[in-house]
Amino acid sequence: MGMLSRDIAVDLGTANTRVYVLGKGMVLDEPSLVAVEDDKVVAAGSEAQRMVGCAAVSVEHPMRNGTIAEFGLADGMLRQFMTRANRWGRIAPPRVAVAVPSGATAVERRAAQDVAFQAGARAVYLVEVPVAAALGCGLTIGDARAALIADIGAGSTDIAIISAGGVVLAHTARIGGEDVDRAIASYVRSERAMLVGELAVGKQLADGPGGLELHGRWKATGLPGTVELSAEEVRAAATEPIMAIVTAVRAVLENCPPELSGDLMDRGVALTGGGSLLRGLADLLRKETEIPVQIADDPFSAVVVGTARHMKGLDTPRRKRRSRGSLVPVGRDPVNGSFVRRLDVGGGKRGPASRER
């Protein structure tokens, strides 16, 4: 790594994108939004969010379910974010590690790699979300003891059993915190005849237990109004998406190799991602899985911090010797039966993709 370049870790989330510069820390945490005018990205992140409602621009979401949905928009967004993040190294392009869901398809992985190149990276590494999350919340994953991690984001939930530095089983469920927000907004629309924004629901859900006071517009009159939901109504409205998350975690547990079950009984499941703070989720997981449940100290940043920690090991002699390997199948997704692919934390099985190849 040259003196005028820094390694960068990126978590391209459905709701927020986070960028971590090695040697500096997390330098950017912005909404995954772009403002588009005349087919050009004119703003990204918080700046784009402030343009919601402006007649001249449309505000779009480049990410969906934890992967890139609109390549051109994601390209424009990451370019702007990388420009801000890499202002300490203006000459040499950085190496970039991007977190990707364990269930991402080959096309989705390639899109994540390509968008980082388009944003100015000289080499790109892909790190799977559950591996990054485990590293980010301080789990020891290099020894033989198994660990269970569940990263619950806005658009997807990534669950994996990790042992000896590798992924044993993994599953990505295309459901997350935004589905809970939508379920509650739908309940208010059908049962209380009020139109409320999903963003408003999400902000209040993060504030703590209890009911909700939501501001919106009455369906009948179109006038502004307020509706109050009891804690019981909130639980009832959110039951379906929350149970879907619990079912996904159980599916991985139920397919755990017997020799690793004892480790999971002792260590439990570690939760990361903003969705880990959903009301009642941790308690329901404890009840349904009968294992301990811990929420990371900083669940929002665990993935990007873990991706950065992975990058710190890229220059060790062992990593250099094995840097041109490829992703290999290591198990089956217990839900859909497909092979799970991973980046081996211990040996650096995926080397950098590079334009110089």
Image: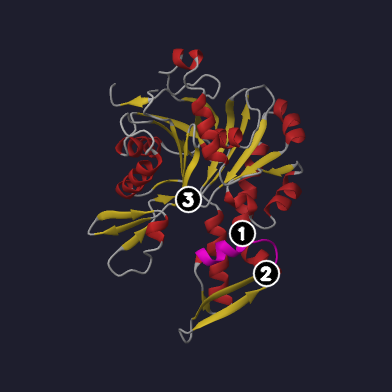
The answer to which of marks 1 and 3 sits earlier in the sequence is 3
Q: Write the start and end of the magenta stretch as one range.
A: 199-211
Q: Nearer the viewer, mark 2 or mark 1?
A: 1
Q: For residue 206, which numbered disc appears in the image?
A: 1
Q: Residue at x 29, y 55 (%)?
A: 42
Rendered location of residue 61, percent (x, y): 39, 55
Total label count?
Answer: 3
Label 3 sits on a secondary structure element that is strand
Rendered location of residue 277, percent (x, y): 64, 53
The kind of residue on which mark 3 rests is: Asn
Q: Is residue 343 visible?
A: no
In this figure, which residue is indicated by the disc labeled 2?
A: 211
In this figure, which residue is indicated by the disc labeled 3?
A: 16
Q: Residue at x 45, y 51 (%)?
A: 30
Q: Tell me whether circle 2 and circle 1 mark residues in contact (CB < 8 Å).
A: no
Q: Residue at x 28, y 26 (%)?
A: 355
Give the quadrant of residue 356.
top left
The kind of residue on which mark 2 rests is: Gly
Q: Nearer the viewer, mark 3 or mark 2?
A: 3
Quadrant of the snapshot with the C terminus: top left
Label 1 sits on a secondary structure element that is loop
Q: Classify 10 Å Cα crowding around label 2: few (below 14), some (14-19), many (20 and above).
A: some
Give the quadrant of residue 59.
bottom left
- 203 within the magenta span: yes
